[in-house]
Image (cartoon, rainbow, N blue to C red):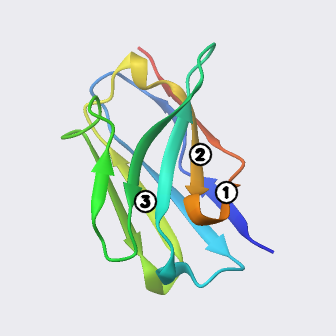
Amino acid sequence: QVQLVESGGGLVQPGGSLTLSCTASGIIFRLYAMAWWRRAPGKQREFVAQIYSGGGTTYLDSVEGRFTISRDDAKNTMYLQMSSLKPEDTADYYCYVPQLATWGQGTQVTVSS
């Protein structure tokens, strides 16, 4: 059974930084692309970033240059380093395995002064 557990969310001021983690179990982690999605209050869930098994990455235009997705296959963990955070980045952030259509439970990020 695949399990995805996110952590690292919280309250941060505009311009601040935060790093999210997603640890997976029940899969051969290194074989799978992994992604971050988010859902802002009152909005639909949107793609944020993806990292492929080979390390290639893609980003939502509005976060490129501010967010960095990475993975540590030895730890079965994916990360999202977020910097220069803006109030519009406020959302629940979800870990996702596209090939398995499996979601984590989400972690809340609030950007506010």
Question: Which badge, 3 or 1, comes first in the chain's sequence?
Answer: 3
Residue at screen point 44% across, 17% down? 112
Tell me the crowding category of disc 3: few under 14, some 14 to 19, or many 20 or more residues within 10 angstroms, Cα based.
many
Are the two marked residues, 3 and 2, in contact with CB atoms closer than 8 angstroms? Answer: no
* Residue farthest right in this picture: 1
Query: Residue 71 at what x, y percent from top left?
Result: 40, 70
Residue kind at label 1, given as amino acid type: Ala
Residue at screen point 32% across, 29% down? 85
Query: Residue 42 at what x, y percent from top left?
Result: 63, 13
Residue tagged by mark 2?
94
Residue at screen point 65% across, 80% down? 27
Residue tagged by mark 3?
79
Q: Determine the CA span between mark 1 and mark 2.
A: 12 Å
**Screen quadrant of the C terminus:** top left
Tell me which corner region of the image, top left, top right, bottom left or bottom right, holds residue 24.
bottom right
Q: Which structural element holds mark 1?
A: loop
Q: Nearer the viewer, residue 20 or 46?
A: 46
Residue kind at label 3, given as amino acid type: Tyr
Query: Residue 60 at what x, y percent from top left?
Result: 33, 37
Q: Determine the CA span between mark 3 and mark 1.
A: 19 Å
Residue 50, placed above or below residue 38: below
Question: Which badge, 1 or 2, comes first in the chain's sequence?
Answer: 2
**75 left or right of 107 in image:** left
* Residue farthest front in this picture: 99
Residue tagged by mark 1?
101
Q: Determine the CA span between mark 3 and mark 2.
A: 11 Å
Question: Which badge, 3 or 2, comes first in the chain's sequence?
Answer: 3
